[in-house]
Image (tube, helix red, strand yellow):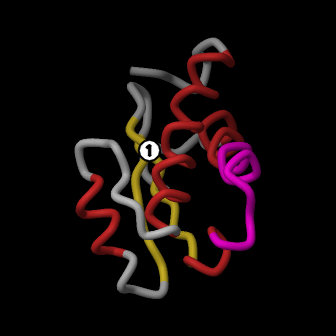
Amino acid sequence: MTTAKSPLNALQEQANKIARSLKDAERRELPSIANGEKISNARLQKNIKFAVVMDDKIITISMSWATIYDTSEAGIAEYILKQMRDANDAFN
């Protein structure tokens, strides 16, 4: 589990995994994570809302599938990483 003050490489790894799962789902491939089927089912909606669970906070993020389609995996990971490092509230 990570916190906002975890080493950058640990946060980056977590953000990359989330971004990869989102891009897999956007391409209608079953993401290779525990909730992959739920993410794929969310593809039927206009947006997806997901949580990044950390030791010191839970960050909720909502993204449209159009944004996921238009943004590279690296760009999505960068956005998630920024949220993980900047968010100060326990629940956003």
Task: Depth check: give the residue in front, 15 or 24.
Answer: 24
Measured along the vertical axis of the image, is residue 18 above or below residue 61?
above
Per the image, label 1 sits on a secondary structure element best described as: strand
The stretch of residues the image draws in magenta is 69-79
Q: What residue type is labelled 1?
A: Val
Based on the picture, tell me whether residue 78 belongs to the magenta stretch.
yes
In which quadrant of the rendered view does residue 88 lie? top right
Dominant secondary structure (helix, strand or loop) of the stretch shown in magenta? helix
The residue lying furthest to the top in this view is 7
Location of residue 8 in the rendering, given as x and y in whole percent from the top left corner: 68, 18
Q: Which residue is drawn at 25% across and 51% down?
A: 35
Q: Is residue 24 left or right of residue 1?
A: right
Above-or-below relation of 2 to 7: below
User: Can you identify the residue that label 1 sits on?
Assistant: 52
Q: Could you tell me residue 5's position as x and y percent?
A: 61, 18
Whether 33 is drawn above or below 22: the answer is above
Front residue of 27/5: it is: 27
Q: Quadrant of residue 44?
A: bottom left
Quadrant (top left, top right, bottom left, bottom right) of the N terminus = top left
In magenta segment, residue 1: no
For image coordinates 74% across by 57% down, the residue present is 72
Residue drawn at (41%, 61%), measured in percent from left and top? 29
- Residue 31 location (% of width, % of height): 37, 52
Total numbered labels: 1
As rendered, which of 11 and 92 lies closer to the eye? 11
Q: Nearer the viewer, residue 57 or 15?
A: 15
Left or right: 75, with 89 as reference point? right
